[in-house]
Image (cartoon, grey):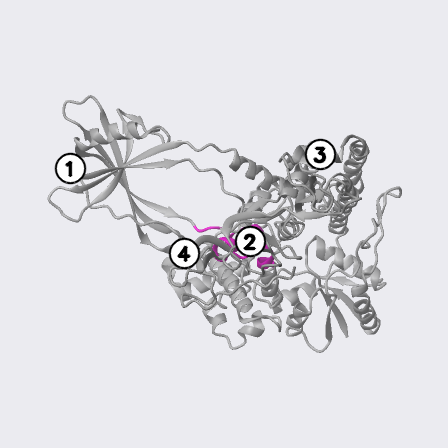
């Protein structure tokens, strides 16, 4: 019997289907050795030697695997082919005491891939192991050395992280950019025109030039300026002076990488990065898609041939471009030996999977609900569509640009307007992977043709501040700046939320919590390298060099730790908690303590600001700092509705007299009343407005039950 070890039981069950009775496949259930919880676990005086222990939850698994290994002819390590997977394989050899073993790796869980991997075993790649170990040690140093500093200077329970701190900084800086933004007024002028003597041929043209000078977006700044131009245009004669008709082509997008999959899943389905990776893991373990932690656009020759066959057979030869498209990533650190995310078999298309009687066992985990199975199906369909589309023909459009001259008799001012049209001529890859585009039909026009003006419409606009980061745009920014790697995006986004540094608004966009502002400012001012984008990106490059064998791991840690240690010692003496909190909290407090009548102070915890008695610890009175919505509580009519949080930091909206008044809603009240029953209207997480009354005929919507 040959023993194959993988990470999960699902992956184990899938591989068993492809192998005979001579193989036993067992799961490790993830990492089986790690740094100790609650202890630093790094010997700083002995070349940063890590102390690895077997977690309590893994001891039973190790005992079981040791028994299997003793009776096996050979042990084959088939964990994932990335740094984490390679580290798991290495830890298995240590925990199980393996002297002889084989290491195999594959990018997809299919019978040909498994059989090919078994024919080509290799040694454990210690460069990958060292890179993973270096990242783990660096993160442990930052977390265990810097976090206690935050406890002393701000509040107990805070933590700092090498990558997460940079992500928080991006969100904080974006929020400050939004708050400091000053909108600028500008006007846009549009003319509705039509062909002479042809009703129903109306089309729109926008002001483009004034006296041969281009009119920029912000050039018309006031209503008076716009009104003057409108008067000129209303009395002008219109004539076509130039027409450009051309065929334009749109090429398909490349196949998904981890980053682009997370971004597109957010845009289309509002899946969080964590949820996307969890679903992709299920698809991979069930043999439906290739490995989902990748930054490469590479596609195997077998997959390209299968895509060509599917396109020719099911879509037609006009949808095949005549060659296989190959894409190259711009990232210097991309692992080109890996593949992009793709379906393992293009012929297993979404309709066939959706109609499969084994759909729930295929996508569920035994306990998953219908909704979770549906989510996995959506992600599979997206991956399948993107892969197939990247091998299809270009989409073809007929585009028209019409330049129109507007001249007012006896006036020295001449205006030019432009109308653009676009219609689809051939769908190409859009047949499989639809993208939003606007079709604009223009009537057939000829050069020097006179036109009739129907009306001129000026419209006022204001420049807009940059948007808050969504999960998609934050992942895109992290990738752009070289912060983190495919496996770190989802846990980074989860960490900064669970630690309370950032929150999400009604549109599910990130904004910093008070404690996020405070911790970020402390790190920027006193530990600039920790939150420096360029420095963190450089560290990622060095980790990549370790993984490729171009750099030793020990110097990477030494170069970071020695200056970090010295700076930490200096800042322990320099930074005053009182001065730090006083500078950040400038609001004037006039409330007094109800117990001893002393003034209240603003204090901070990991959950944000709160009021505490200035006589602490003699007087231990404290009070939450609640944000009022300015809406009277409909239940007691004595107080206002405020934003509150449960013990698990989940936001809800309740009466400020709570728990004396137990009115509470999960969704934010709008301030408007339901026209049917006069109850409060709320805005749901999906940005829809509903009635808060569960008995209202307009919907069935209930009150929140808190765990506070």
Q: Label 4: few (<14), some or many (≥20) within 10 Å?
A: few
N-terminal label among 1 and 4: 4
Q: Is residue 505 magenta?
A: no
Q: Secondary structure at mark 4?
A: loop
**Earlier-in-chain disc, 1 versus 2:** 2
Q: Which mark is residue 449?
A: 1
In the image, which disc is placed on residue 405?
none
Residue 278, position as x, y percentages in the image:
61, 61
**Dot in front, 3 or 1:** 3
Q: Which residue is mark 3?
A: 580
Q: Badge 2 is on which residue?
A: 262
The label nearer to you, 1 versus 2, is 2
* Picture layout, residue 405 above or below residue 73: above
Residue 5 against residue 88 in the figure, above or below = below
Q: Is residue 241 left or right of residue 574?
A: left
For marks 4 and 3 on the same chain, the one whose residue lies earlier in the sequence = 4
Quote the CA–CA distance across marks 4 and 3.
Answer: 52 Å
| Crowd around label 2: few <14 · some 14–19 · many ≥20 (10 Å) | many
Which residues lie in the magenta part? 252-277
Q: Is residue 4 left or right of residue 42?
A: left
Quarter containing the C terminus: bottom right
Q: Earlier in the sequence, mark 3 or mark 1?
A: 1
* 70 or 538, nearer to the observer: 538
- Identify the residue position indicated by label 4 in the image: 434
């Amino acid at each position: 019997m040959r023993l194959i070890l993988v990470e999960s039981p699902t992956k184990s069950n899938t591989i068993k289907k492809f192998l005979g009775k001579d193989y036993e496949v067992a799961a490790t259930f993830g990492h089986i050795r790690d740094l100790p919880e609650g202890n630093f676990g790094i010997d700083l005086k002995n070349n940063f030697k890590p102390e690895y222990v077997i977690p309590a939850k893994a001891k039973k698994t190790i005992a079981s695997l040791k028994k299997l290994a003793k009776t096996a002819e050979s042990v084959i390590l088939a964990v994932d082919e990335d740094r984490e997977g390679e580290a798991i394989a290495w830890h298995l050899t240590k925990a199980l005491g393996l002297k002889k073993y084989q290491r195999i790796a594959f990018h997809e869980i299919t019978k040909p891939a498994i059989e090919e991997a078994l024919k080509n075993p290799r040694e454990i790649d210690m460069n990958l192991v060292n890179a993973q170990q270096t990242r783990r040690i660096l993160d442990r140093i930052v977390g265990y050395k810097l976090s206690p500093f935050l406890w002393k200077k701000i509040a107990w329970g805070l933590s700092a992280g090498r990558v997460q701190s940079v992500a928080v900084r991006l969100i904080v800086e974006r929020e400050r950019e939004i708050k400091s933004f000053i909108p600028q007024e500008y006007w846009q002028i549009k003319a509705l025109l039509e062909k002479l003597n042809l009703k129903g041929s109306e089309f729109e043209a926008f002001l483009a030039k004034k006296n041969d000078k281009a009119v920029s977006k912000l050039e018309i700044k006031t209503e008076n300026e716009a009104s003057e131009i409108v008067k000129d245009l209303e009395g002008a004669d219109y004539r076509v002076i130039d027409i450009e008709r051309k065929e334009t082509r749109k090429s398909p997008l490349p196949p998904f990488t981890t980053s682009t999959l997370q971004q597109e899943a957010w845009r289309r389905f509002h899946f969080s990065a964590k949820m996307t990776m969890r679903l992709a893991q299920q698809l991979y373990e069930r043999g439906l898609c290739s490995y989902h932690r990748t930054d490469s656009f590479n596609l195997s020759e077998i997959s390209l041939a299968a895509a060509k066959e599917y396109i020719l057979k099911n879509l037609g030869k006009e949808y095949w471009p005549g060659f296989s498209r190959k894409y190259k990533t711009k990232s210097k650190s991309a692992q080109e030996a890996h593949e992009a995310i793709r379906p393992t078999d293009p012929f297993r298309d979404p309709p066939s999977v959706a109609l499969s009687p084994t759909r729930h066992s295929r996508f569920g985990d035994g306990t998953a609900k219908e909704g979770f199975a549906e989510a996995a199906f959506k992600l599979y369909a997206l991956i399948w569509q993107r892969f197939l589309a990247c091998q299809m023909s270009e989409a073809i459009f007929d585009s028209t640009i019409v330049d129109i001259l507007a001249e007012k008799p006896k006036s020295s001012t001449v205006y030019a307007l432009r109308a653009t049209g676009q219609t689809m001529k051939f769908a190409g890859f859009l047949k499989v992977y639809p993208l939003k585009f606007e079709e604009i039909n223009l009537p057939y026009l000829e050069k020097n043709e006179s036109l009739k003006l129907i009306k001129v419409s000026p419209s006022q606009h204001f420049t807009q501040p940059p948007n808050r980061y969504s999960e998609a745009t934050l992942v895109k920014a992290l990738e752009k700046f070289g912060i983190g790697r495919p496996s770190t995006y989802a846990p980074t986004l989860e960490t900064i939320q669970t630690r309370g540094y950032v929150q999400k608004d009604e549109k599910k966009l990130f904004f910093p919590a008070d404690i996020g502002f405070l911790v970020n400012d402390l790190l920027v001012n006193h530990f600039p390298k920790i939150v420096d984008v360029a420095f963190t990106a450089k560290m990622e490059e060095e980790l990549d060099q370790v993984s490729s064998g171009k750099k030793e791991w020990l110097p990477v840690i030494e170069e970071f730790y020695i200056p970090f240690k010295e700076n930490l010692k200096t800042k322990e003496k320099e930074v005053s908690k009182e001065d730090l909190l006083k500078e950040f909290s400038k609001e004037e407090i006039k409330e007094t303590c109800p117990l001893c009548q002393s003034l209240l102070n603003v204090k901070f915890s990991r959950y944000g600001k709160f009021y505490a008695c200035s006589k602490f610890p003699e007087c231990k009175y404290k009070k939450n700092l609640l944000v009022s919505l300015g809406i009277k509580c409909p239940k007691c009519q004595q107080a206002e509705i405020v934003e509150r949080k449960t013990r698990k930091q989940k936001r809800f909206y309740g009466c400020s007299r709570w728990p004396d008044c137990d009115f509470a809603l999960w969704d934010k009240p709008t301030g408007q009343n339901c026209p049917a029953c006069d109850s409060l209207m709320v805005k749901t997480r999906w940005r829809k407005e509903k009635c808060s009354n569960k008995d209202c005929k307009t919907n069935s919507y209930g009150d929140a039950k808190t765990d506070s």
